[in-house]
Structures are given as C-alpha cells and as structure tokens.
Amino acid sequence: MGKIVALGEVVSDIYRGEEMSAVELGFVARPGGAPANVAVAACRLGSGAAFIGSVGEDLFGDFILRALESEGVDTSGVGRQSPPTRTSLAFVEIGADGDREFTFYRSSPAADELLSPEDVAEDLVSGASFVNFGSIPLIREPVRSATHRIAELARKFEVPVAFDVNFREHLWESAEAAREAVDPLLDLSTIVKLGDDELSPLLGTDDVEEAAGMLLDRGVSLVLVSKGPEGAFYATSEFSGEAPPFDVGEIVDATGAGDAFLAAALVHLSGKPLEENRVREATLRGCAAGALACNDYGAMRALPTKEDLEQFMETN
C-alpha cells in the first residue's frame, strides 16, 4: 500500500482551558487542519502518509511538526516561513451538540498560504495510493498553484485524487469565488467528498443524488457525501447507496470527524477497484471512524487507531 499524500493547511486549534483567575483565560493548543488530520488518521489506521504544507518558524510551527512526526507522518514536504509570517491559529468554540465554530487568526499571508508549486516534489507523489487536498488552499496564491501542481502530478503518475471540499464560506470573498476556484479541481478528481451542507453553495442543489450525478457526469469516479448524524451517501456511475450512522452516545467534539471518515474510506480503498461491496464497506468504515472521532476534544487525538476501528465495528 502506497502512502496517502495530503497537501494543504495545518493549524493550531486553540480550545478553552481552565480559567486561571478572574482576569486570566487558560487555553489548550491542539494540532489540526483537515489534510494534516487525514494524514495522521491514515497512519493510525495502518497506512503510510505524508503531509505537504508550510508552517511558520515559530512556537506553533515547532509544535505541529512534532505532533505530525510523532504519528509517523512523513514531513519532508513541510516548509518553514520566517517572521512576520506565522502559523495559523483557529480558536474553537464547542456547542452543546458537539458542533464547532472556528475563528481564525492568520498573518497576511499566513504560513500555509506560501506553499509554492516548486515545493511539491514529484517523488512524494509518485507511487502514492491517493493524493488528498481541500478547498482552503485554493483561496490565495501561491498555494493555489501548488494544489493544481499536485493534482497534475497525480494525473501524470496515475495516482487517484481525493478532493475533500471542506468549504469554509467565511474565509472566501464570496461563494461565487469559491465555486470558481473549486470547479477546475473537480475535473481532476477521482473521489470527491462533500458534506451535505456544501452541496447547495457549491453545486446549486440540495438533492444528494442530483449533486452526485453532476459530479459523475464530469468524470469523478466516486462521490461521498457525509451527512453527520444521518450517516453517508456514496455513488459511482454504476451504483449508489447509503451507509448508516454509528451511535457513540454523547458527542464531545466533532472536530476532525469528517477527516477521520475520509481517511478510513481511503485506507480501505487504497490500491483496490471501486467495486460495490468494497465502496460500501469503505463508507461504513468512514462513518464508524467519524463517530469515534467525536469522543474526545481535538482533531488529532480523537482519531481512531486500526484496532479501535475494528473493535468498534465488530461490536456495532
């Protein structure tokens, strides 16, 4: 099995900690960022993984690199940016239902935005089982061009592309700008994963089957739509279906659940044809991994291991 190679943003998620006094707020920093989460989740599930990105030469950049390397992620494709460019911070507010709101603190440009096409090495892409990225790197140059480069290299080396759209509307000038940036990458993607709340702003429909049909007609091989507590939908040009949700009781923090879903699906599909039974099982495993990722605070520390996932699926 080749490595799953993820490109894009990596951030330090900042959670509220214990209040130290009436005039002091305590905070806890945890590593995050969708593609980095996918790389860590893939390692925990038994795959190799590499991350391509950029962090600042600062406290949070050091912390994030240590976190990735401790999980076995290949960080040879991670660059460092000198001050005043900084690693991005994302302050996370957790609602009563476990859902999150993010407030980003970024230098302009942020360290992750300075990844250039020249930073994307061919040898990291060649032989990979999947290349993965989202839409956040498409907001600004030069990382937008770096994203196009890895998609083009994937096509050159016949490596399937998994595009997890991960639309964050407040980071864009407009939904129209996001659609224009996302659209060309859909034509280079083998697998497209979206949340059901991303269908309308990006594809102009709330209907899951209609959205899947639009993407399949453009050459996408597999469409995955995560539906949160309602499970997930999958479709190819030959079949489609639903995977049920898994109950883990109280949802502590849903951060990283979608990334766990995608990683589990990609690990199960790596190097294998998109046959119906395998795609259904991959989607089921994705739902199970996503559910497990809601059991603790933080994107990375809640990601399940292979043993966790196998045991959970056996008992559920």
Image (cartoon, helix red, strand yellow):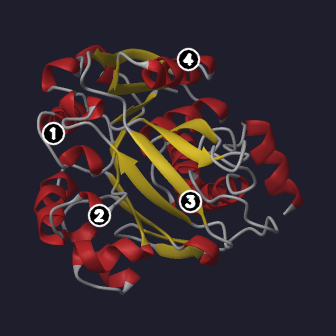
User: For the residues marked 2 and 4, what is the alpha-carbon distance in whole angstroms?
Assistant: 30 Å
User: For the residues marked 4 and 3, what is the alpha-carbon distance in whole angstroms?
Assistant: 25 Å
Which of label 1 and label 4 is nearer to you? 4
User: For the residues marked 1 and 4, what is the alpha-carbon distance in whole angstroms?
Assistant: 28 Å
Q: Which residue is mark 4?
A: 66
Q: Amino acid at mark 2?
A: His
| SS type, badge 1 | helix
**Which residue appears at 89% of the width and 58% of the height?**
315
Q: Position of residue 119 (x, y in %)?
A: 21, 19
Q: Which residue is mark 2?
A: 170
Q: Is residue 123 left or right of residue 279?
A: left
Q: Position of residue 4 (x, y in %)?
A: 45, 32
Q: Amino acid at mark 4?
A: Arg
Q: Does the rendering let one see residue 271?
A: no
Between 198 and 283, the one lying in front of the other is 198
| SS type, badge 2 | helix
Upstream in sequence: badge 1 or badge 4: 4
Return the residue found at the far front: 23
Which of label 1 and label 3 is nearer to you? 3
Upstream in sequence: badge 2 or badge 4: 4
Q: Position of residue 141 (x, y in %)?
A: 11, 38
Q: Which residue is mark 1?
A: 148
Upstream in sequence: badge 4 or badge 3: 4
Q: Amino acid at mark 1?
A: His
Q: Position of residue 269 (x, y in %)?
A: 51, 45
| SS type, badge 4 | helix
User: For the residues marked 1 and 3, what is the alpha-carbon distance in whole angstroms?
Assistant: 32 Å
**Which residue appears at 37% of the width and 49% of the height?**
104
Q: Is residue 238 left or right of residue 15?
A: left
